[in-house]
Amino acid sequence: MPADARSVRVDSEFAPLRTVVVSRNEFRGPADPALIGPEMPTEPGAADILNAVWGKDFGAVYPDRQQRWEAERDELAAVLRRHGVEVLRPRTFTAAEKEAAGPAGYANFFVRDPWFTVGDHVIEGVLQFPHRRLEVLPSRDLLLDRVMPSDAHYVSLPQPGVGLPGPGPFLEGGDVLVLGKDVFVGLSGMATNALGIAWLTKYLRPHGFTVVPVRLPRHVLHLDCALGLVREGLLIACPERLPDGLPLRLRDWERIEVGEDEAAAMATNGLPIDAETYVTDPEFERVGKQLEARGVTVEYVDFAVSRLFGGAFRCSTQPLLRAD
């Protein structure tokens, strides 16, 4: 089925990217470590940042880094536009939304997680960390503008139960990788939980999708911090972060392996623009050279500040149209 500018659909991780949302750069740390939830993120960059910004705005503590962070996302947007991709941006938080977040803090920095698209289904998830619970709101206007007039389905998870973090359901877009009618969903317990996967399975099954849970170690926030699909038959993976190995459908694919340290720095979190073009950080030139040896054009964008928060190019984008 040919795509057009009015479509809202994601066919796979590497179908041609036509319309994408690129993240903003807002973060205020929780006022108290107890408000982060049951445990701290253990990716080195994320933990170091939290220790410096409890109850504070990142830009106030690190004004130079804030400027570089914003420039990184702007450069990514420029690269995508150069390749013919329509780029949308969420708005920033309103004063009322910041006030409503209260001592939990707030984040508007990785648009991949609060909502996601599977086929022609746009799903608002629920984020486990309290400071991220309102992160969908800056995207709401563009979702209403783009998704409501389209033929796409538009749903959201049930409200999460009370608690810190509580029973959920939790379901985060960084855990969701799309490959046609197969949907791989990461499960470490730090983000998506079993109830979130059960909800997604129940919702998508009547539409012909198969949801495949992928177990992750407890310290790995999302599946895209362990696995990235570059094109049909080629992937990037960190074996140490996939204790059960690759999902069955992917086991005969050619793989570029990265170690734990590379994965923690976000080596698997690049972004295919299409099956022949891939965006990554110059930090991962080793991976980039292996991709180029396989005929993939690699675009390098310095994402050093973005990666401090535990995410990179996939985390910083959310497609609304990725289709042939």
Image: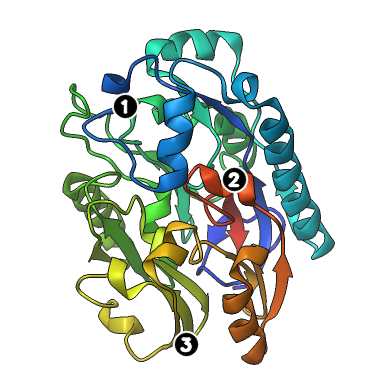
Instruction: Determine whether the residue tagged by mark 3 lies in a helix, strand or loop.
Output: loop
Of the numbered discs 1 and 2, the one sitting upstream in the chain is: 1
The residue mark sitting in front, 3 or 1, is: 1
Mark 2: few, some, or many residues within 10 Å (few <14, many ≥20)?
many
Cα distance between the residues tagged 2 and 3: 29 Å
Residue 276, horizontal then vertical, whole percent: 67, 80
Check disc 3 and give the amino acid type.
Gly
Instruction: Give the residue number, with chain letter if any, for mark 1.
Output: 36
Residue 256 visible in the snapshot? yes
Check disc 1 and give the amino acid type.
Ile
Of the numbered discs 2 and 3, the one sitting upstream in the chain is: 3
Instruction: Give the residue number, with chain letter if any, for mark 3.
Output: 233
Instruction: Determine whether the residue tagged by mark 1 lies in a helix, strand or loop.
Output: helix
Disc 1 to disc 2: CB gap under 8 Å: no
Of the numbered discs 3 and 1, the one sitting upstream in the chain is: 1
Cα distance between the residues tagged 3 and 1: 39 Å
Instruction: Name the residue: 44% across, 74% down.
Output: 258
Mark 3: few, some, or many residues within 10 Å (few <14, many ≥20)?
few
Q: Nearer the viewer, residue 131 or 1?
A: 131
The residue mark sitting in front, 2 or 3, is: 2
Instruction: Give the residue number, with chain letter if any, for mark 2.
Output: 306
